[in-house]
Image (cartoon, grey):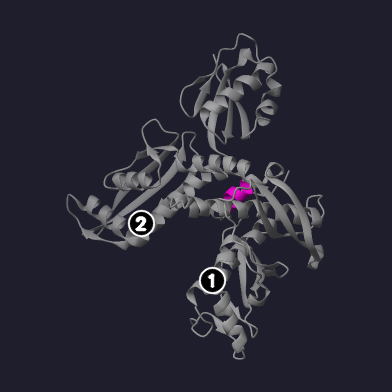
Amino acid sequence: MIKKLCLLALCSLSVQAQVDVLADGTLQTQACAYGRGGTAISGAKAQASAELISFIKGNKSLTTQSAQQHLTTNLTDDAANLYEQQRTTMIEGLSAGAVPLNYSTPTLSGNDTCMTVSLNPQELGEIQEQSWQQATQDISVTVIGQGWKKEGKTALINAEQDALQRAVSQVVGVWLTQQHTQSSSMSMDIVDGNESTNMQELIGQQLSSHSEGLVKEWQTLQSKQLKNGGVEITIMAVVEKAPLIQQASQLLSMIGSPRVQVIAPEPLKTELKVWLSEQGIEVGDAASLVIYAQSDVIKRGNNRQLRLSVNVRDLAGNIYGNWKNDPSFMSLPDDPYVEKDLMAVHLASESQSKALHSTLNTAFTQVVARGGLVREVLLPSNKLTQPEKLHAVLSTLGGVSDVAIDKRSDYTVASLRYKGNTGELAHALDQALATITVKTLSKITIENDFTLRYK
């Protein structure tokens, strides 16, 4: 089983990098991510790829760069020509994680982990476009993994695990591309403390924990030693499409179609409902997630400003995202409609609206990132024959995480996260709890998406 530190495993990107061009046409950038260890290293690598993509998209040739990028004066004509020829290939390859990048040894800079990452157009082979429509049930990818000795595992084992995760993630990207899905969930960012990643990485890393059922076979093509005892390997992996489609679809459905209750003043309430509708997210009062918004008019002499806050929370009170506007953005003279007028202006602002939508994107993806929605299971304490085993039994259920046990009056309450719908959880609970409860325990009742109760 492949395990990666953090389901999302990418730290928040803290520094805007710049791209340098060397004499042979090599593109080089230094990227940093907040934190330490594998999580921060992955974040720095992701930041570097994003910077390289941005540079290549913005520069059709190496002679039309902005002032923020640096070009050596002795760039050869051959290097400049090769860049233009390989430009499209590099963009596509970087987006798919299918081009060879050279990484320096990670270094520490304050609270950040930094790496120098380079891409040489001369090292590019022909990037093979994978077609999901082929009759074969397997898809082959070639990927590079890196690892250092950590947590009792050798550098080679960690490099193999990293490569297999990348293989699954790359095939997920192929599948998402073939679906031609326009939903914003395809490009969501996750920001939770020090974590940031896109949807392809999210699904790839989620599925990588079950790679033994997704990677049919793999072989090492090349291996080399890195500084500080690290190992880099290139592998060819064969990923089975059918189970990947099934599992990736389940993860996407958890993000794309939760039911949400909206509690907000107008016109913000309508704005939120329209956005949710555009994402394919249902709105209703009987919901497992709530978007809760508040507005407050601030007095500034004869003028008024507006303070807005919006958060996404579940019924257990967990907050997945929180947005606050910039009150100083607009001031208006006081009148009976000043609150609605100010709200309309803020929502019409591209920067304010973009920040709000970004927070909402983040919040809904966080539900998956944290392991699904929180549910409470209430069991009569006198019906438990082996209460000491309740935590262990629940923890062994597939898709269940973050189990916590508490007492509430005559009930033992189990709080847990589950990566699926409440009906599936109820069925699994009925089977699992039979071994530690009396035979007279009632069938489970689903009171709502948050609460399941036995009597």
In the rendered structure, the answer to whether residue 329 lies left or right of residue 71 reads: left
Q: Please, is residue 24 above or below residue 320 in the view? A: below
At horizontal 58% and vertical 79% (from top left) the residue drawn is 83
Q: Given the image, on which type of amino acid does mark 1 rest?
A: Thr
Q: Secondary structure at mark 1?
A: helix
Quadrant where the C terminus is found in the figure: top right
Q: Quadrant of residue 246?
A: top right
Q: Within 10 Å of the Cα at label 1, are there few (<14), some (14-19), or many (20+) other Cα atoms?
A: some
At horizontal 54% and vertical 71% (from top left) the residue drawn is 88
State whether the magenta stretch is mostly helix, strand or loop: helix
Q: Please, is residue 377 above or below residue 335 in the view? A: above
Q: Within 10 Å of the Cα at label 2, are there few (<14), some (14-19), or many (20+) other Cα atoms?
A: some
* Residue 190 visible in the displayed image: no
In the rendered structure, the answer to whether residue 367 lies left or right of residue 117 reads: left
Q: Which mark is residue 431?
A: none
In the rendered structure, the answer to whether residue 386 lies left or right of residue 371 reads: right
Q: Secondary structure at mark 2?
A: helix
* C-alpha gap between disc 1 and disc 2: 32 Å
* Residue 39, image x, y percentages: 66, 56
* Residue 222, image x, y percentages: 79, 63
Which range is magenta?
201-206
Q: Is residue 369 one of those drawn in magenta?
A: no
Q: Please, is residue 400 above or below residue 351 in the view? A: above
* Residue 422, image x, y percentages: 52, 29
* Residue 209 visible in the displayed image: yes
**Residue ID for mark 2:** 353
* Residue 112, image x, y percentages: 63, 64
**Residue ID for mark 1:** 88
